[in-house]
Amino acid sequence: MLFLKLGGSLITDKTGVEAVRTGVLARLAGEMAQARAAQPDLRLLVGHGGGSFGHVAAAKHNTRQGVSTTAQWRSFAEVHAAMLRLNRLVTEALLAAGIPAVSFPPAALVVCADGRITTLANAPIRAAVDAGLVPVIHGDVAFDVVRGGTIVSTEEAMMALVEALWPSWLLLAGETAGVLDLEGKVIPAITPETLPKVAAALGGSRGTDVTGGMASKVRGMLALVERDVSLKIRIFSGLEAGVVRQVIGRPEEAAGTVISRNVV
């Protein structure tokens, strides 16, 4: 079982508004189809970020921090609608490549408490995997018992599914070649022990991405691998043709940064 996340900056142009990189998305779908054809028993769950779709509306009213006013609830609905538009394009690209993709919007599955997922209805997703389908999830709005509403990232939704589906790898495809050090070079591996040595290079967690930057994502991934020692995570670039297919086929030998409990 593999989880593969397509970063929003990879499949959309984040400098535009709802601008999809159609050619990149079609190529990635084709590479996933090739990898599945080469490994008929492969079970795969795909996630994708919001890119130039969800983040614009989310930043307008600071949706992640809470929803209470009429204007904020309107923004909540707008974020969800934007993510559904992108998700439809991703799902259709996968179907066109021959992948039996089925969408599972987190807004209908997740309940949060103060910004953290407390419940994710995973039974339909497990049924889809058992049927040989490929579930597709994404960053989305979610109802929150403390904040009213919030936003969950794709990684957060994936992390909530780990104990239900037990993936061996969580593969994060973005624009950068991996986690970079202060000199701009790829850090091959990060473990809880080595985190203090590379923490300065991660930068802050604030930015145009309303769900947090690299620092928060790396720390979240480390917390996950500490809970599940069998899980490994790879952060890599999906811009180069053929890399996604190679990573799915042999994730232990691919390029990028590996995040694990112990040195791989």
Image: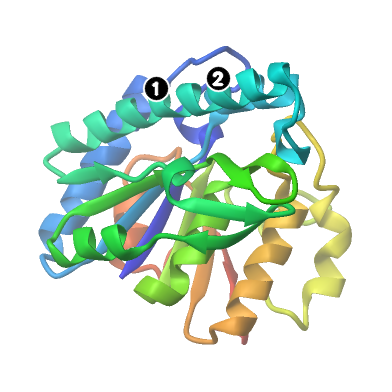
Tell whether 24 sits left or right of 7.
left
The residue depicted at 27 percent of the width and 58 percent of the height is 124
149 or 221, nearer to the observer: 149
- Where is residue 180 drawn, in percent x and y? 71, 53
Q: Residue at x 73, y 65 (%)?
A: 219
- Residue 188 visible somewhere in the drawing: no
Q: Would you call the spot at circle 1 few (<14 residues within 10 Å), some (14-19), or many (20 or more)?
A: some
Amino acid type indicated by mark 1: Arg
Front residue (pair 133, 94): 133
Q: Quadrant of the C terminus?
A: bottom right
Quadrant occupied by the N terminus: bottom left
Q: Position of residue 127 (x, y in %)?
A: 21, 63
Question: Quick one: SS at disc 2?
Answer: helix
Give the Cα separation between the discs numbered 1 and 2: 11 Å
Residue at figure coordinates x 10%, y 65% from the top left: 40
30 left or right, relative to 111: left
| Residue 218 marker | none
Percent x, y of residue 54: 56, 27
Residue 167 found in image quarter: bottom left
Type of the residue with mark 2: Glu
Using the rendered view, name the quadrant where residue 36 is placed: bottom left
**Considering depth in this image, is 198 or 141 the residue closer to the camera?**
141
Question: Which residue is tagged 1?
Answer: 85
Can residue 3 be seen here? yes
Per the image, the residue denoted by label 2 is 78
Which residue is drawn at the image coordinates 42% and 40% (left, top)? 240
Q: Earlier in the sequence, mark 1 or mark 2?
A: 2
Q: Which sits in the foreground, 105 or 261?
A: 105
Mark 2 is surrounded, within 10 Å at the Cα level, by few (under 14), some (14 to 19) or many (20 or more) other residues, namely: some
